[in-house]
Image (cartoon, rainbow, N blue to C red):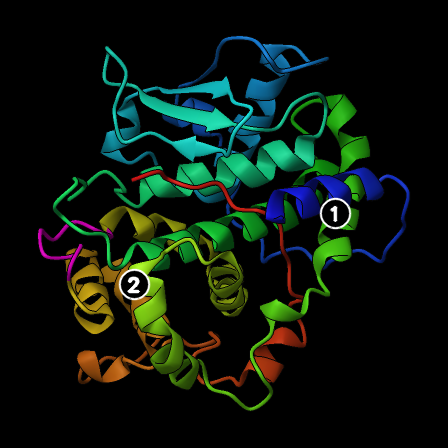
Amino acid sequence: MRRVSLIFASVLISLTCAPGVDAAQAKKAVSSRKLGLSIRVEGGGWGSVHKSQIETVLYSVADELLSRLPAKLAAPIVVTHSDSNPLALYDRGPQGEYLVHLHARDARWHLYAYEFAHELCHIMSNFEENAGADSGRHNQWFEETLCETASLFTLKSLAATWEAAPPAPELSEHAPKLRRFIEMLVNESHRQLPLDTPLAAWLMANEDRLRDDPYQREKNEAVATLLLPLFERNPENWDALCYLNLDPTDARNNLRQYLRNWYHNAPAEHRSFIAGVLALVGVADALPGEAPMSGGAADASPAAVLAPNAALTAQAGRVEP
């Protein structure tokens, strides 16, 4: 059902007009290719576009999320087309490369951006740590939520980047399409918590189900909408994802312990931001004495957060267990 909705929206964006979406706060311009990131698009099934065009778009996505190159991304990312869901494989290629499948094809660059941002977020988040049939993945839902947030952030920021300085001249005309894609999807009601419902209270009612099934997309997307303003105000902190999922106990911890481990594994430059995430989800007391980064959404009600940041949606890529 979600894939049908996404395909339908993809077709309609070229037929509808909508007002633009404010760009995320500018992040210092980065060339992920110059940092050393290697993305290789391989195989067939891509339709009417060349692999080099796809690589240009995927590097542009990485530019929005990376401020530096994590050591793990010294390994290349090999991207192939799939007729199934987009996903990042736990297994590596023969040379240690990351393997990513995307469902997008032809020149639907908004879908490439949406899907690849999600899968790159999984890689940045150490998704393969503590993976295994017996490990459990009880906090996978939070990683899925972060990756949904990454997709939304990327669509929004790419629209501004391609409008001002596209990585290829022909991509400038796709900036309005990115904006229309976002605007068309903003009104899905599941993205908004009930009015005056704090996220912490909502999580108390829903976390057990999310721990049992991390792919409850509507719930992931509701939380992602509330996380988005934190990253928009602090875009350099996408690097903080590189310190998630590093503790051997993370797969089975409760959310409080899981996020506390993230905080303690991160360097000082990211800790105030991560404290803001803990405050938003209602577990700030796990870090006594730490003040969240100012300018975040930690103390805002859902209505206040949503007012300047419209709800966005599309089917997220998934990491198969």
Seen at 29% across and 63% down, the residue is: 211
The residue singled out by tag 1 in the image is 181
Q: At label 1, which amino acid type do we have? A: Phe
Q: Secondary structure at mark 2?
A: helix
Q: Residue 112: in sight, yes or no?
A: yes
The answer to whether mark 2 and mark 1 are in CB contact below 8 A is no
The residue depicted at 34 percent of the width and 19 percent of the height is 76
Left or right placement of residue 77 versus residue 7 in this view? left
Query: Does 206 appear above or below 21?
Result: below
Whether residue 63 is visible:
no
Residue 140 point in image, percent of width and height: 30, 54
Q: Main secondary structure of the magenta part?
A: loop
The numbered mark at residue 211 is: 2
Residue 173 spot, x, y in % from top left: 82, 32
Residue at the extreme left: 248
User: Relative to 93, does residue 131 appear above or below in the rendering?
Assistant: below
Q: Secondary structure at mark 1?
A: helix
Residue 249 magenta: yes
Quadrant in which the C terminus is drawn = top left
The amino acid at mark 2 is Arg
Give the extent of the magenta segment. Answer: 244-252
